[in-house]
Image (cartoon, rainbow, N blue to C red):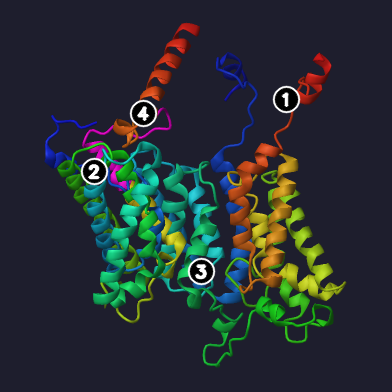
Amino acid sequence: MSEEKRLLNVSASPHFRSNDTVTGIMLDVIIAMIPSLLASTYIFGLRVLLVTAVSVVSCVGFEFISRKVMKRHNTLADLSAVVTGMLLAFNLPVDIPLAMVVIGAAVAIIVAKQFFGGIGQNFVNPALVGRIVLMVSFPVYMSNYGMPFAWQHKGVDIVTTATPLSVLGNVADKADLTGADLPSLMYMFMGIRQGSIGEVCAIALILGFLYLLIRKVIKPTIPLCFVGTVALIMLIAGKGNFTFVGYEVLSGGLLLGAIFMATDYTTSPVNFKGQVIFAIGCGLITSVIRLFGSLPEGVSFSIIIMNILVPQIEKFTTPKPFGTVKEKKAKEETK
Amino acid sequence: MADKKKPLYKEFTKGLIKENPVLRLVLGTCPTLAVTTSVESAIGMGLSASFVLICSNIVISALRKLIPDKVRIPCYIVVIASFTTIVQMLVKAFLPDIDKQLGVYLPLIVVNCIIFGRAEAYAGKNRVIASAVDGVGMGVGFTIALFLMGAVREFFGSGAFYGHKIFPESMPAMTVFILAPGGFFVFGLLMACANKLAEKKGVPKAELKGCEACPMAQSCKIALIDKEKCEENTVKEATAE
């Protein structure tokens, strides 16, 4: 919009608007996810791209169909379905049957997003709902993580081993953990380990995080508080064993969840105080599930549970409007 | 509100969609979610509850002038409990498999709120024949709703229908449908469909405003008061503007 046009534009308040658009933000998120996608393609082979493509295409397709059926305006252009599709694929193991990817996309887009009114109205993160429904329905396929670089050694028999998290869960005394049965911390950092498509490569995820920070798409509050809480609790649980903390932070979907999924605008609180409460809650639930639960991983469940609590958090952290006095004070003054 | 102008068959058909006890009145959700993991137990539950509902409707309606208003709830419970005991004994004797599947939910028919709701809202105020027809309609509506839920959940959740495998072995079933979240999901979808159907039949669209749209509105005193209040408020708002 030119300067003159902007001045002549008569509209209702607010009159100051940022130039951010939903499409722009979603595009930034997609760009931020690309390093992780590339790293994963290098680690797990080209099937990563196939799974991601199927997920994205089916998410966009379901979005289109459900908007058509519900007779609402088309929202394909805001790219939110593409982001959901990529996040869903990031949460799946590389060898998952493609039909299951489509089911996950249907659950994510139709049930979690469009039934509640589409973008901006969903009360939980759609991609996580897709993942959890798949996880509960097909536990065998969802925990069949491929070995890194298996695609380069086609003929060789590859022994599937336990994921780092399930090894960690079986360690009796967390303080004695040395990491002998696990890939080294450096490997964990570079992503040469088992896991879902998008969660393995910590460097790529952190690159994406920095990009989002520089573009001011997200604030660092939620990711830092989330990871910080988990690290702190693991430090206590491991009685000061930093190796253990390192493995806990780098394994599972913690970084992916903290950076890309807990920070979803629709399902996280708007102001600083609320975001801190939200993120600490996520960290607490994740740690409790990891330490005491029967499942090895709890990031997705923790984010979903805190998503549901967001309205309550917002209620308690509503800031005082400028120029007003708190009710109690006002009453005392009138007395 | 013994409405004599209303033909009797309408008392039956209202229970199917317009005032379907599960999908429109949202009564009896607990057994609905608990026993609909398979078609067999859903039908078993639906028929047993329908039997108790019809019989208790008849008896309560016949006794409506004898039962003092202040102690009507205990009286209703005695009537309902005796019929539930009969059903329980019959099912235990002749259909032990279904008895095992339903477990505690069979004796819990005593406190099923559909039966209570009909006794309170209909049978306690209407003639015997009308009450019996109402009971049949509600019972059929309840059974249909349970059957639909059971069919969807069993089909997706264990790949079968009435115990017969449909899915090929290579195709894994979606366990989530058997679990509680899947139950709520199917329940919500069926409710949406029932609302849509009811809307097509001319029932006003349900909104979070007043209780005119409630399927119970006709037999509910609060609805009338609420309606007056709503109208007052709108008048006030109009004058304020």
Label 4 neighbour load within 10 Å: few <14, some 14-19, many 20+: few
Please determine whether, in this image, residue A176 is positioned above or below residue A82. Answer: below
**Range shown magenta:** B192-212
Marks 4 and 3, how far apart at CA: 48 Å
Whether labels 3 and 2 share one chain:
no
Q: Are marks 4 and 3 on the same chain?
A: no
Q: Which mark is residue A135?
A: 3
Closer mark to the observer between disc 4 and disc 3: 4
Q: What subunit carries mark 2?
A: B
In which quadrant of the rendered image does the C terminus of chain A lie?
top right
Say which chain tag 3 marks: A
- Disc 4 target residue: B221
Element at label 4: helix
Type of the residue with mark 1? Pro
Label 1 sits on residue: A321
Q: Residue at x 41, y 52 (%)?
A: A110
Q: Please give the residue where the numbered disc 2 appears in the rendered image.
A: B61
Amino acid type of the residue tagged 4 in the rendering? Lys
Name which residue type carries label 2.
Answer: Ser
Q: CA distance from mark 3 to mark 2?
A: 51 Å
Chain letter of the residue carrying label 4: B
Q: Secondary structure at mark 1?
A: loop
Q: Is residue A61 visible?
A: no
Q: How far apart in space, not on screen, are marks 3 and 1 (Cα)?
A: 44 Å
Q: In terms of sequence position, does the residue under pointer 4 or pointer 2 come before the other?
A: 2
Q: Is residue B197 magenta?
A: yes
**Residue drawn at (80%, 71%), measured in percent from left and top?**
A237
- Whether pointer 3 and pointer 2 mark residues with C-beta atoms closer than 8 Å, the reply is no
Say left or right for B116 vs A308.
left
The residues bearing labels 1 and 2 have C-alpha atoms spaced at a distance of 59 Å
Can residue A78 be seen here? The reply is yes
